Image: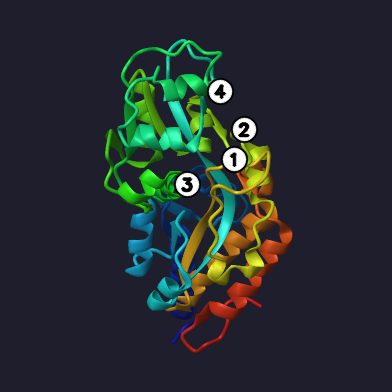
Amino acid sequence: MNNRFKKFILGITAGAALACVSVSQAAGITGAGATFPYPIYAKWAEAYKAETGTNMNYQSIGSGGGIKQITAKTVDFGASDMPLKPEELDKNGLMQFPTVIGGVVPVVNLPGIAAGALKLDGTTLAAIYLGKITKWNDPALAVLNKDIKLPGSNITVVHRSDGSGTTFIFTNYLAKVSADWKADVGEGTAVSWKAGTGGKGNEGVASYVQRIKNSIGYVEYAYALQNKMNTVQMQNRDGQFVKPGDVSFKAAAANAQWDKAPGFYKILTDEAGKESWPISGATFVLMHKVQEKPAIGKEVLKFFDWAYGKGDKLASDLDYVPLPENVQNLIRKAWKDQIRDASGLPLTK
């Protein structure tokens, strides 16, 4: 083989290798699921790509879709606001870990009512969604809002139409505070609604409420902020009316004992504390314990390790609550103990 031909072959080989690297970097990692964390995952992905060159493509399709896709192994990670119980994780060979904590907030379109002025409690909110309270000047609402002149208009109820972890957090809360709700509807990512119209995703609910006067819906707080929506005050377990935001979400998360939660199964609704927002919750990532593509699995863990280390400010800017450092370290240990390649070797050190 002459030198010119050798150089030609080496050039092709090197070019092919570079092409493979380029394709690998372009492909990046994929995830799908909950709309609740979509705003922060999008921010993290943008910053991570700028720093590392690696893409993180996340599809905001709802928690139900995320669970289905990771179970079917069509994405590298799934995301759900409804934590799976340890037995469900074991059945599907999955592990889960929380990423951030946030809040689900009722939002209203009530012309003439100042933003954040309307007050609700859990039983009244449940009665509205059960279709038992149908007008804004109902006596139950009037008692809670003595300083507001409520309209006599009909209430238009908006809920999620898709399988949703936001719905799980919302209905889990209502089931805790309303015996009627628990008996008639219960909790879940999808329930049999007694009233209202459905919108797909937090985006769909936000869009409906913005367009329909005298309506009420529920969305993750970041969506309320981004869309400048009118949120409400909620009466919490300690009887205090609180507004949604960083302070009240942190208060709800303050007593969470993640080290005593098998499989990180923890629900943060109706938590005690004078400042606690009652409809708070963590959002979770789901991954297979045995990674058929360990290189991709490592990239997923690198992304979330980066998010824990460098993404806290981005999370706080969107009014999510970053996880405490001790919880982040618990999660890193769980990665090492549980996520492995086909030969049983851990993906992280």
* x and y percentages locating residue 303 in the rendered image: 57, 60
Q: Amino acid at mark 4?
A: Gly
- Residue count near mark 4 (Cα–Cα under 10 Å), binned few <14, some 14–19, many ≥20: some
Q: Nearer the viewer, mark 4 or mark 2?
A: 2
* x and y percentages locating residue 300 in the rendered image: 52, 64
Q: Amino acid at mark 1?
A: Trp
Coloring scheme used: rainbow
Residue with the mark numbered 1 = 277
Residue with the mark numbered 2 = 242
Residue with the mark numbered 4 = 116
Q: Nearer the viewer, mark 3 or mark 4?
A: 3
Q: Nearer the viewer, residue 294 or 88?
A: 88
Residue with the mark numbered 3 = 173
- Residue count near mark 3 (Cα–Cα under 10 Å), binned few <14, some 14–19, many ≥20: many
Residue in the image at 48% along x and 38% along y: 122
Query: Residue extending furthest bottom?
Result: 343
Q: Is residue 122 visible?
A: yes
Which secondary structure lies at badge 3?
helix
Q: Is residue 43 visible?
A: no
Q: Quadrant of residue 277?
A: top right
Q: Earlier in the sequence, mark 1 or mark 2?
A: 2
Question: Height in image: 167 above or below 89?
Answer: above
C-alpha span from label 1 to label 3 = 11 Å
Q: Amino acid at mark 3?
A: Tyr
Which secondary structure lies at badge 4?
loop
- Residue count near mark 2 (Cα–Cα under 10 Å), binned few <14, some 14–19, many ≥20: many
C-alpha span from label 3 to label 4 = 20 Å
* x and y percentages locating residue 15 in the rendered image: 46, 68
Which mark, residue 97?
Answer: none
- Judged left or right of residue 337, residue 170 is left
- Residues at marks 1 and 2 touching, judged by CB atoms closer than 8 Å: yes
C-alpha span from label 2 to label 3 = 16 Å
